[in-house]
Image: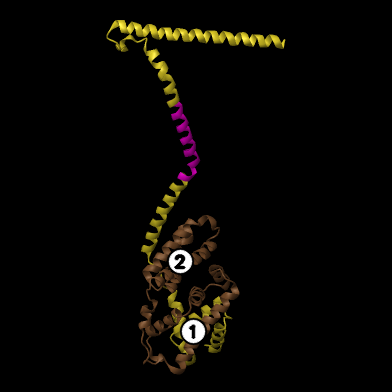
Chain colours: A brown, B yellow
Amino acid sequence: MINFRDDVLPLKNRLYRLALRIIPNTGEAEDIVQETMIKVWNHRGELSTPSSAEAYSITICRNMALDALARKESSNVSLDESPYDTLDTSETPFQTLTREDSRKWVHKLFQQLPEKQRTIMQLRDIEGKPYKEIAQELQISEEQVKVTLFRARQRIRQQFEKIDRYGL
Amino acid sequence: MDYKYIMQLLQRYWNCETTVSEERILRDFFQQEEIPESLRKYASLFRYEEEEQKVSLGDDFDERMLSRINETTVKARRNTIHYRLRPFYKAAAVVAIVFTLGMAAQHSFSTDDAPQQASYNYATYKDTYTDPQVAYEQVSSALKTVGSGLREAGLEANDSTSQTDANVNTEE
């Protein structure tokens, strides 16, 4: 039996971070987490274990975030206007960037990844989840998770090599 | 510090060959201030990954969420009680309809009897005619009609009984 306070509510931060990775707006991400939890709670009869509740929550949360994103895009709100794009480091050598600026730069790197790569980076590198769980949550094979993660890390690595050679 | 191990881990990280715990070692390593020149550029990546784990919702979210859940649970419970009682509602509706029809039928049948029953109560009598002569004629004509009707009915009844008697006789 799933208990809301013990099994669903503690997922809030993980769900929030995932939603935020897809929709870079804190208010909207929070709404998505709320709707996700309501939906999970309404389907609690089909969830036998707390771990299945987590996998189900992640799946629902991602789908809801993607839906919200699609609605936003269809209403012509440009996502290019995200605050992270205003970072101008063109004349600053990377080594002398402040910790905060380099954090912003990495964030931008993450956000520029295609959604699937970004979500897998989130679940693996930030949440520290095993491939098997990610595969379950995204409803794809473990092999696909690995291939997508590989592409994402290679892309990030290339950006790091680039700034190393040419600066930002 | 053995940086060779870290460099090796990093290489395996790029190739997606590291385990979850090895990746944790990398994140932990890059948290420290003293990082060799060759590895320093990657610090921002692992520091970012570590910091992003701290992004979280406040306690006010829990309160809002719990009150919403209580709301929907109460609503859902109400719905299910409603839903479960549905067959009974149907049965009750059928009973109500049958009962109403029965009452209506009984009422329409009993309206013929009602005045007769009430006719014993002389206090409820109301005059229909002012002229006693007219009243007498109406009553006698009505009684004649009833009388002839009764006579005809009696004859028919006698006929049918004699007929059945005849049938019984032939069968024997």
Residue span colored magenta: B82-103
**Which residue, given by chain and number where applicable, does mark 2 sit on?**
A64
Mark positioned earlier in the residue sequence (1 or 2): 2
- SS label for mark 2: helix
Magenta stretch encompasses residue B101: yes
- SS label for mark 1: helix
Q: Residue at x 59, y 11 (%)?
A: B160
Is A6 or A72 nearer to us in this picture? A72
Specify the quadrant that holds the C terminus of chain B.
Answer: top right
**Tag shown at residue B79:** none
Q: Residue at x 36, y 63 (%)?
A: B60
Magenta stretch encompasses residue A52: no
Q: x%, y% of residue B91?
A: 49, 36
Give the distance between the C-alpha atoms of the residues marked 1 and 2, in whole angstroms.
27 Å
Left or right of B10 on screen, residue A73: left
Mark 2, Cα crowd under 10 Å, few <14 / some 14-19 / many 20+, is: many
Q: x%, y% of residue A164?
A: 46, 92
Q: x%, y% of residue B94?
A: 48, 34
Res A29 → quadrant: bottom left
Mark 1, Cα crowd under 10 Å, few <14 / some 14-19 / many 20+, is: some
Res B167 → quadrant: top right
In this picture, is B99 found above or below B18?
A: above
In this picture, is B129 found above or below B27?
A: above
In this picture, is A19 found above or below B10?
A: above
**Which residue, given by chain and number where applicable, does mark 1 sit on?**
A156
Specify the amino acid type for callout 1: Ile
